[in-house]
Amino acid sequence: MLIVQKYGGSSVGTVERIKAVAKRIAKTASDRSVVVVVSAMGKTTDGLVKLASEITPNPCRREMDMLLSTGEQVSIALMSMALQELEVPAISLTGAQVGIVTEAQHSRARILHIQTERIEEHLQKGEVVVVAGFQGISQTRYQEITTLGRGGSDTSAVALAVALQAERCEIYTDVPGILTTDPRIVPEAQLMPEITCDEMLELASLGAKVLHPRAVEIARNYGMPLVVLSSWSDAPGTRVVSSTPPRRAWQDLELTKPVDAVEYDTNQAGISLLRVPDRPGVAAKLFAGIAVQNIDVDLIIQSIHQSNTNDIAFTVGKATLKQAKAVADAILPALGKNSDPTLGDPEVKAEERQIAKVSIIGAGMIGRPRVAAKMFETLAAAGVNLLMISTSEVKVSCVIDAADCELAVDSLCQVFDVGLADVSSNFSKSIMEEVPPPVRAVALDVNQARLAVRQVPVRPRMAAKIFSLLAQLNISVDMIIQSPRCHSLDGILTRDIALTVSQADGETAYQTLANAAVYLGWGEVVLESSIAKVSVVGTGMIAHPGVAAQMFEALAENQINILMIATSEIKISCVVAEADGVKALQALHEVFGLSGSDKIQIPA
Ligand code: ADP
Ligand code: ASP
Ligand code: MG
């Protein structure tokens, strides 16, 4: 019986901690084989990044990998010594010594495969093998040291567990497991004994850094049991469970097909509320009215505003279109008139066209912006116009003309070499013993920047163009929203497109799009870095209309203005001003009843 245990930076932050962890490992190793993965001690990696930045603002990625990989080499050696001191036979190995083979992409390499022979030899001799997390070796002629991306030790551990066919993978950290939110911001956060991989993937990519999303992806793809727990206590922690049966080949561990399936829904109808005043409470009022009628809202997007007005667009089931429109019409008088008469007044527009939603689904899209770009390019090449777009780490959906649906689905299935999704297996509704509450956890991401591209001509290829330009630089677009409102500019119909990227990519993304704007005839590009994204996540929201309304109401009650909204089946994200981020997170945690009476203590 083999267990893989990973200890994060804080768990091995001091010599005392290393000794304490060694004792823990010794206990486990008394009756089974153990492979240990460790991170660099404490904030070592941050310190190394800082050293580099004192020499150059743009360090070469190869040298960064040489530098950052040293942190883990220190901790494996010390951990191995600590075990030997307890008379537990142990040996430390770097990623290269193990043969953790990755692609040759410095600073964000994906694992291709892991050679297990050497580890197995040591295990057979009864040794505990202590492996450096976060690093690998490329397959190229000069085998180069690579790293997997910040937080990547989790991914090393799960990948090793899969390659060694371990019984389970345990991730030890400084909190008791996965909580309803970051306890550093909300100390009343509560432990979740269980979370689905789908929920965890969303949370991890929406700002909850407790697990590296790629680790969750591997666990899900290969059905590896994964537990997150505290290295300070013996509490059972959180199990990350999956409903999807494992079905992967054992080579190219992280390079399996990025897309699992294509999905479509033709039972949708679209409504927009145009030119609504930019003040807290409008979205809340609209969706509260809709929730009262028990109407299920699918996608919601709210675009950026030019001259202080917003556009909100959403989709509902066809049968409820009239009802939803009536709700929207009813709130119009309360919105009043716009102070600037040239803008026109608020207006409700039901989409006259028949529409359909097509989506690509797959955890393999994480950190691979080229996948979404390829979807948009494929649709553009087929002449399909995109009416709405909604993105999440594991799903990209486009609302299109229903007449284009078959063509869109066929092209996407062909390009990604997949079939249509079995819609029933879509989200793991039934693996929880009890009916889950609509919202299970909330997350805050303050490392995002918003870009607005004004006056983009309304024609196919525009979203594709933006995504491809950024994907070439490996920049992931997080949210993207096209305004449903078109302006006529010199006889050409144009609209605004807003998107968010990580703050680190903000300046490069801005430069790229600003250059493109010049030769493609787009309008101004605007970069805004002082934003935050708050999100609520839960598979239970599929069956609960009204979650969006509750979220928007809570924000409005706290006088927080919503700048952008994007939804997928199991998450709703709002972009707000950075200064409102923490307050927004705390308000949402409270309103969805996630706070407990005990405060989470984080070891100093
Ligand atoms: P490690 O060094 O063990 O890898 P990390 O710092 O990467 O630890 O991740 C653990 C931290 O993640 C916690 O200390 C906590 O502040 C943060 N965190 C953010 N969101 C959550 C959440 N939903 N549940 C638990 N921890 C969270
Ligand atoms: N030491 C690396 C980092 O700080 C990897 C990890 O801790 O997971 O990003
Ligand atoms: Mg971590």
Image: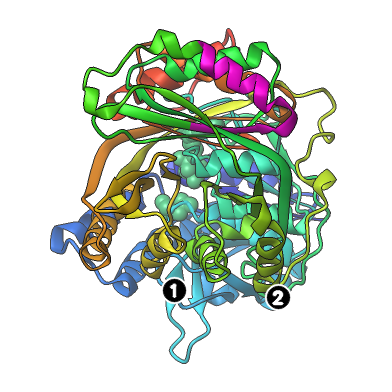
From the viewer's perspective, is 208 left or right of 336?
right
Q: Is residue 35 above or below residue 293?
A: below
Q: Is residue 128 above or below residue 391?
A: below
* Residue bearing the label numbered 2: 251
The tag on residue 13 is: none
Residue type at mark 2?
Gln
- Does the magenta run of residues contain 319? yes
Mark 2 lies within 8 Å of ligand 2 (Cβ measured): no
Q: Is residue 504 above or below residue 302?
A: below
Q: Secondary structure at mark 1?
A: loop
Q: Which image quarter holds the C terminus?
A: top left
Residue 549 x %, y %? 56, 18
- Does the magenta run of residues contain 549? no
Residue 62 x %, y %? 33, 74
The tag on residue 105 is: 1
From the viewer's perspective, is 459 left or right of 96?
left
The numbered mark, 1 or 2, whose residue comes first in the sequence reads 1
Residue situated in front as seen by the camera: 406 or 135: 406
| Pointer 1 local density, CA inside 10 Å: few below 14, some 14–19, many at least 20 | some
Q: Is residue 478 above or below residue 343?
A: below
Task: Say which residue appears at 34% left-offset and 36% top-offset.
Answer: 304
Q: Residue furthest front?
A: 491
Q: Number of labelled discs?
A: 2
Q: Which residues are magenta?
A: 313-330
Residue type at mark 1?
Gln
Task: Say which residue appears at 41% left-offset and 41% top-offset.
Answer: 483
Residue 357 x %, y %? 65, 47
Q: Are marks 1 and 2 in contact (CB under 8 Å)?
A: no
Q: Secondary structure at mark 2?
A: loop
Main secondary structure along the magenta-highlighted residues: helix
